[in-house]
Image: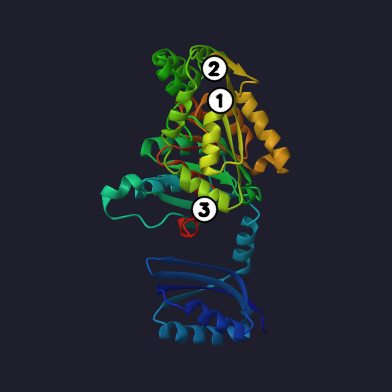
């Protein structure tokens, strides 16, 4: 009596056009049902797997035709019969959570991959797919300072201890000099709409208030207060008030000079180009100053800028005071929520990127919070961090691939 058979075929060999079409055409002629299919190409070598269901009376003919066709195509084929119990067990695993683990750095090593895979295995998760998001790495080691490597793991299961898994990942990344992200693969991960950035030491490689202080001759004093605030040792509001007071008497003309020579963080231009083409809304939420935020808005096309306004006297000099509310850590979180209302999006669809202690409230509030070249305290509390490459590394945590970012 006829019954259904489940057959898994694995094809490998030199990749060339038409292989998948030729093999699935054979299955089509016998009305086979494809239950699962996956294909990868690694350095022009094909790996193709197809699991199909067919009437047992037809399976012999299908196998024979597949053997002849794969011989003609100069590829190898393996056949495995899959029991209904095995198939049902596989289906049951699909109901478990899926996570995306992304590793990122100037280069990706076998040690990094092996160590990450070991942690995944220890937590009882199964790696389903591995995808390279960056272009191929250069063989010339001298090009590595501008190179990037990124690999994305899609894993399935429920970790035995997610907090420990996250902690192990962050410790490993620090030891082996790479960055890592672990995100649950929900509908929100694939529909991010708003990304908010800190400005100083995030979009630019300096603290503007320090630049102003240098011009005012109080650089060392202001820097000591800045560093203490970024480490979370003193309240941001107190530190801000003290630093602004030290700027009293500075001619505002120096702001234009500073803006035009700001050291822009590696990757900002590429990041903003891709985000704008992809329809993201972008915002600067900064404890710095609106003058410089607006300069970056005009230069790179940010949609929103919220920062602090310095008071200017009638003589064209800073008064040592500020106008309006201070944009501190809590205010950044409030602004993130406000922008969600303005754009009519869920908070889970947001990303926040920053480096200092005053960024932690918005990093923890956003759907995806990323510590960028952050202070140790911030990096320790953030779930994702980037410390090895430029800020365009954010794009890989969002799942972008070089192959379509550069079109």
Q: Residues within 10 Å of mark 3 (few under 14, many from 20)?
A: some
Q: Residues within 10 Å of mark 2 (few under 14, many from 20)?
A: many
**Towards the viewer: 280 or 185:** 280
**Towards the viewer: 181 or 301:** 301
Q: Quadrant of residue 353?
A: top right
The tag earlier along the polypeptide, 1 or 3, is 1
Q: Report if the CB atoms under discs 1 and 2 are less than 8 Å apart.
A: yes
* Residue 93 image offset from top left, x and y in percent: 62, 56
**Towards the viewer: 148 or 76:** 148
Q: Secondary structure at mark 2?
A: helix
Mark identifier at residue 287: 1
| Location of mark 3 (residue) | 400
Q: Report if the CB atoms under discs 1 and 3 are less than 8 Å apart.
A: no
The image quadrant where one finds the N terminus is bottom right
Count the marks: how many?
Answer: 3
Marks 2/3: CA distance? 37 Å
* Residue 344 image offset from top left, x and y in percent: 73, 43
Q: Residues within 10 Å of mark 1 (few under 14, many from 20)?
A: many
In the rendered view, would you say 296 is above or below 22?
above
Mark identifier at residue 240: 2
Marks 1/3: CA distance? 29 Å
Q: Secondary structure at mark 1?
A: strand
The tag earlier along the polypeptide, 1 or 2, is 2
Residue drawn at x 32%, y 44% is: 145
Q: Report if the CB atoms under discs 2 and 3 are less than 8 Å apart.
A: no
Marks 1/2: CA distance? 8 Å
């Amino acid at each position: 009596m006829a019954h259904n058979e489940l057959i898994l075929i694995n094809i490998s060999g030199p990749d060339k056009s038409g292989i998948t079409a030729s093999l699935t055409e054979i299955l089509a002629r016998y009305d086979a049902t494809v239950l699962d299919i996956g294909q990868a190409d690694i350095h022009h070598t094909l790996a193709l797997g197809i699991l199909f269901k067919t009437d047992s009376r037809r399976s012999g003919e299908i196998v024979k035709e597949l053997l002849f066709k794969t011989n003609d195509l100069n590829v190898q084929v393996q056949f495995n019969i899959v029991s209904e119990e095995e198939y049902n067990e596989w289906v049951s695993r699909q109901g478990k959570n899926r996570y995306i683990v992304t590793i990122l750095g100037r280069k990706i090593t076998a040690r990094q991959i092996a160590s990450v895979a070991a942690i995944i295995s220890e937590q009882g998760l199964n790696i389903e797919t591995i995808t390279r998001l960056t272009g191929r790495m250069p063989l010339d080691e001298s090009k590595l300072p501008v190179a990037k490597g990124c690999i994305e793991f899609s894993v399935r299961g429920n970790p035995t201890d997610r907090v420990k898994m996250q902690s192990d990942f962050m410790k490993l990344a620090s030891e082996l000099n790479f960055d890592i992200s672990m995100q649950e693969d929900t509908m929100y991960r694939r529909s991010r709409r708003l990304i908010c950035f800190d400005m100083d030491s995030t979009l630019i490689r300096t603290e503007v208030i320090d630049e102003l202080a240098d011009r005012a001759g109080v650089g060392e004093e202001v820097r000591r207060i800045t560093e203490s605030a970024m480490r979370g040792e003193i309240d941001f509001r107190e530190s801000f008030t003290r630093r602004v007071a030290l700027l009293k008497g500075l001619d505002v003309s120096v702001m234009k000079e500073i803006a035009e020579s700001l050291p822009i963080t590696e990757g900002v231009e590429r990041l903003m180009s891709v985000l704008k083409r992809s329809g993201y809304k972008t915002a600067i939420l900064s404890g710095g100053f609106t003058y410089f935020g607006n300069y970056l808005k005009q230069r790179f096309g940010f949609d929103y800028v919220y920062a602090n306004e310095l008071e200017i006297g009638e003589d064209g000099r800073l008064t040592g005071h500020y106008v309006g509310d201070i944009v501190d850590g809590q205010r950044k979180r409030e602004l993130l929520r406000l922008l969600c209302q303005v754009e009519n999006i869920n908070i889970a669809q947001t990303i926040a990127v920053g480096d200092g202690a005053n960024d932690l409230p918005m990093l923890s509030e956003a759907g995806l919070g990323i510590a960028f070249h952050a202070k140790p305290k911030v990096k320790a509390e953030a779930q994702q961090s980037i410390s090895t490459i430029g800020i365009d590394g954010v794009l890989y945590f969002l799942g972008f691939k070089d192959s379509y970012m550069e079109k």
